[in-house]
Amino acid sequence: MIIDTHAHYDDEAFDKDREKLLDSMQNRGIEYIVNVGASIASCKTTVGLTRRFPNVYGALGVHPDEVASLTDEDFDWLKHAIYKPKIVAVGEIGLDYHWMTFPKEQQQEVFRKQMKLAQRVGKPVAIHSREAMEDTLKILKKFPDVKGIFHCYPGSVETAKEVIDNYYLGIGGVLTFKNAKKLVEVVENIPLDKLIIETDCPYMAPTPYRGKRNE
């Protein structure tokens, strides 16, 4: 059985053939898909996909690039929606210091807020961390009871060994990129049962399909 643990089939890249693709997945060996929210809007479309397709489950959360869109009203919706059928995790949440779309403090506040939600409801998290590992780890350590997946794992072998008691490492198309030496080292040194398959589709297509729509 193959499970895609992190996908974005609500993305507009699939508007023309979403239904055909998702209906065909089980025939292609993909038994289940976890569609992951990144904004309140995509969380709502994710809920819709879980209702329409029996093989699609969902994670609901606000990505660090979308924190400005999280109003008090939206967070109230999220707190209730996380209990909906087939919603299995809180995510995609975390920190992203690459583009610095929003200040670090604002990102950290929303990250902590969503970690508290995961802790309260007893669900795992999907963690996004880009160029922010030190601050990500500081926040995760404040929630030792929360477990989950480090989406598109970006860290070192040493950091991986530090987090694998609570977190699986999400491995996708990046592993095939020429500049993925650090990730290759992680995969070679971390037990296989701590690695999780994910596509992050429509992004992160593996070589030789890099730059094309992933699925």
Image (spheres, rainbow, N blue to C red):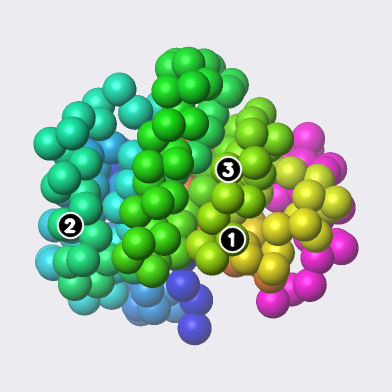
* CB contact under 8 Å: marks 1 and 3: no
Judged left or right of residue 11, residue 89 is right
Q: Which residue is mark 2?
A: 81
Question: Within 10 angstroms of label 3, few (less than 14), some, or many (20 or more) residues?
Answer: some
* CB contact under 8 Å: marks 2 and 3: no
Give the CA distance from mark 2 to mark 1: 24 Å
Give the CA distance from mark 2 to mark 3: 24 Å
Residue at figure coordinates x 54%, y 29% from the top left: 96
Residue at figure coordinates x 17%, y 66% from the top left: 84
Q: Nearer the viewer, residue 63 or 207?
A: 63
The residue under label 2 is which amino acid type?
Answer: Ala
The residue under label 3 is which amino acid type?
Answer: Ile
* Circle number at residue 144: 1
* Circle number at residue 30: none
* First along the sequence among labels 2 and 1: 2
The residue under label 1 is which amino acid type?
Answer: Pro
Task: Determine which quarter of the picture holds residue 14.
Answer: top left
Where are the magenta residues, as a range?
175-193
**Which structural element holds mark 2?**
helix
Q: Which residue is mark 3?
A: 139
Q: Main secondary structure of the magenta part?
A: helix
Judged left or right of residue 27, residue 165 is right
**Which structural element holds mark 3?**
helix
Residue 75 rendering spot, x and y as whole percentages = 21, 41
What residue occupies the far front of the structure in this picture?
142
The reply to whether the magenta stretch includes residue 107 is no
Residue 181 rendering spot, x and y as whole percentages = 84, 43
**Which structural element holds mark 1?**
loop
Give the CA distance from mark 1 to mark 3: 10 Å
* First along the sequence among labels 1 and 3: 3
* First along the sequence among labels 2 and 3: 2
